[in-house]
Amino acid sequence: MPPYDCMLLFKPNVRKEALIDLVARVGKHVLRRNGVVTSVKSLGDVQLGYGIKKLDGRFYQGHLMQLSMMATPDINKELHYLNKEDRLLRWLLVKQRDVNFGLDFFGDDGRLELSRLSQIRKPEDEDDDEDEDNDEYEVEEEE
């Protein structure tokens, strides 16, 4: 499943509970489609470069939230119900490109290096049992 970022721009007069409610609803939708929500970030209030006109007025600022997820590629079509959401000014789904996870992160050279980790041994001249500074840590017993 490829990673996505869903950017949600809320109207500035939306209450915090309503913000959380919509973000939770999107997260539940992703989970029902066998996706995983990896993080939710509030990027705070942002000043817009131009006004966004909605039925209840023109907005020059908004509250920006980022929802990171791993979902199936058809998640974009499934999130179109957000177009009718009156708490949102805009929403955008961005697919993260060239993101590697697990062993793909290391590439071909990394796989060889990881297989060498099990072959690492201590040098033969090093001995764990022998400790030369025992005198320094002697404890005197009380009578």
Image: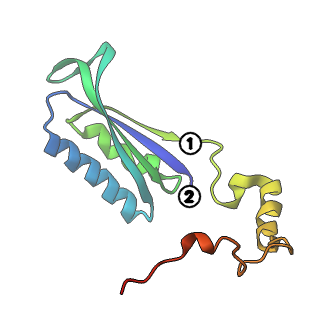
Residue 115, position as x, y percentages in the image = 80, 68
Mark 2–mark 1 Cα distance, whole angstroms, equals 11 Å
Residue that badge 1 annotates:
96
Determine the residue positioned at 78% across, 57% down: 110
Relative to 115, say whether 20 is above or below. Answer: above
Determine the residue positioned at 66% across, 70% down: 133
Q: Does dot 1 land on a helix, a strand or a loop?
A: loop
Residue 90 is left or right of residue 38, and the answer is: left
Going by the numbered disc 2, the residue's amino acid type is Met
Residue 111 is left or right of residue 46, and the answer is: right
Please state, as top left, top right, bottom left or bottom right, where the C terminus lies in the image: bottom left
Relative to 131, say whether 90 is above or below. Answer: above
Q: Residue furthest top?
A: 50
Tell me the quarter of the picture where residue 95 sits: top right
Which mark, by number, is residue 120?
none
Relative to 137, say whether 9 is above or below. Answer: above
The crowding category of the residue bearing disc 2, from other C-alpha atoms within 10 Å (few below 14, some 14 to 19, many at least 20), is few
Going by the numbered disc 1, the residue's amino acid type is Gln
Residue 91, position as x, y percentages in the image = 36, 35
Q: Nearer the viewer, residue 123 or 130?
A: 130
Determine the residue positioned at 43% across, 47% down: 68
Residue that badge 2 annotates:
1
Residue 137, position as x, y percentages in the image = 55, 72
Determine the residue positioned at 45% across, 43% down: 5
Residue 123 is left or right of residue 55, and the answer is: right
The crowding category of the residue bearing disc 1, from other C-alpha atoms within 10 Å (few below 14, some 14 to 19, many at least 20), is few
Q: Nearer the viewer, residue 60 or 38?
A: 38
Relative to 130, say whether 117 is above or below. Answer: above
